[in-house]
Amino acid sequence: MDEKADKKPEICYVINHIDWFWSHRLPLARGAQEDGWDVSVAVPGANADENLADEGFKGIDLPAPDQGFGPLGVIKTICALRRIIRRDSPDLIHAITLKYAFITGLATLGLANVKLVHTIAGLGYLFSGEGVKPKVLRTLIGPFLRLALRRANIHLIFQNPDDMHIMISRGFADPDRAHLIRGSGVDTAEFMPREAPSETNDQGDNPIVVMPTRLVHDKGVAIFVEAARLLKEDGVNVSCQIAGGVTQNNPLAISQEDMENMVKDGAAEWLGKVSDMPALLAKAALVAYPSYYREGIPKVLLEAASMAKAIVTTDHPGCKEAVKDGYNGLLVPVKDACALATAIKTLLDDPKLCAEMGAHSRQRAVDEFDVKIIVKQTLETYNL
């Protein structure tokens, strides 16, 4: 019997954080497994996570990440990944995030037999950061980014059309091998609409506005807090809550001390990391997310939509993919706390409109963003 003929094809997912794999990419890895692939996951911390083996996945440990595009950390990971690829010879590598697409692209230079799919899940700090450092990084990295991303054996998945246009127009992506798959999807069965619990929150029976987020400055956390202050000054009865734990290895991260100082006046409440997001969202009258980060499509917005919530977010790449202005929420300019506060008040003052927008959110989640749709579209790129 030919053992090679009986061997399943192997796919290796390369991802930045083990928690991110479980929260965003587990359905895709399971889908690949069901589609006949042997699945390995190359990620920092893989050796310490026994759940990978329980799922039938092979865990491959990568070096711990550094902040941004630090050259030593990037080179270290490139070398480690190249050794792994030469040892295991996967048939397909799917790298997720711009940073790991960049690293994987360079690690596979000269390895013509390896097929690559990269998901560019937002352009992040490299393209959204302001000031001298990100501009210098873009100049220095540009030629290497083209080398890493624009090759005949690479297909690129973008989560919103703005990112795809930028990368094609600047020569980082080949339009014939660029694909639009909007977001990582949402489990519409888990994030089902439900009645808000009957008990009141800590601040009485005021409606709750939730901002679920990683604690990164460009997510607009300070804008949300300032909008909460404006609503309070305007006499609006509302409880504004921020749900998110302190993040690591991001140059834009908000420290615990900074976060505590930001909310010490009581205008907004910081809940910390919340493990049961459906329960939290069930309590919310609406969701606000004033991000100006270069995201793909924020998963928190898809989760909010799936739970039939009206959403206030920014007219910004990624965010505006999840919300059609006036249909399932309201779009506001970036970095505009006054506009955010006004939009929140508009929806709180009109419960009927808020409910109608919530129903539209749920329909969009089911029709456009269900994780089964996203997994199917992604698996199709593996056969191109």
Image (spheres, rainbow, N blue to C red):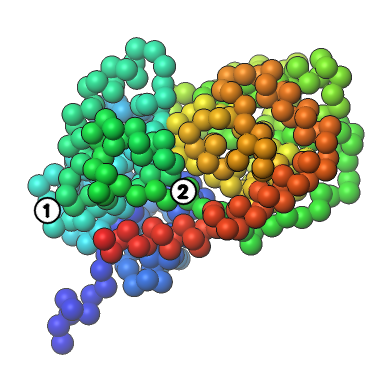
**Would you name the residue on which mark 2 appears?**
182
**Quadrant location of the C terminus in the rendered image:** bottom left
Q: What percent of the width, then of the height, locates residue 30? A: 44, 65
Pinpoint residue 97: horizontal percent, then vertical percent.
37, 41
Near mark 1 (Cα within 10 A), the count class, few <14, some 14-19 or many ≥20, is few
- Among the two numbered marks 2 and 1 on one chain, the one whose residue lies closer to the N terminus: 1
Circle on res. 112? 1
In the picture, measured across the screen, residue 291 lies left or right of residue 133, that is right
**Residue sitting at x 67%, y 42%:** 327
- Please give the label number shown on residue 221: none
Q: Could you tell me if residue 245 is visible in this image?
A: no
Q: Residue at x 67, y 21 (%)?
A: 339
Amino acid under disc 2: Arg
Q: Which residue in the rendered view is the most extreme toward the front? A: 326
Callout 2 secondary element: loop
Residue shown at the point (70%, 42%) measured from the top left: 310
Above or below residue 360? Residue 167 is above
In the depicted view, which residue is nearer to us: 233 or 320? 320
Residue 221: image location, x then y, percent: 61, 25
Check whether the beta carbons of the residues at disc 2 and disc 1 lie within 8 A of each other: no
Three-letter code, disc 1: Ala
How far apart are labels 2 and 1 at the CA level?
A: 29 Å
In the foreground, 114 or 273: 114
* Vertical position of residue 30 compared to residue 264: above or below: below
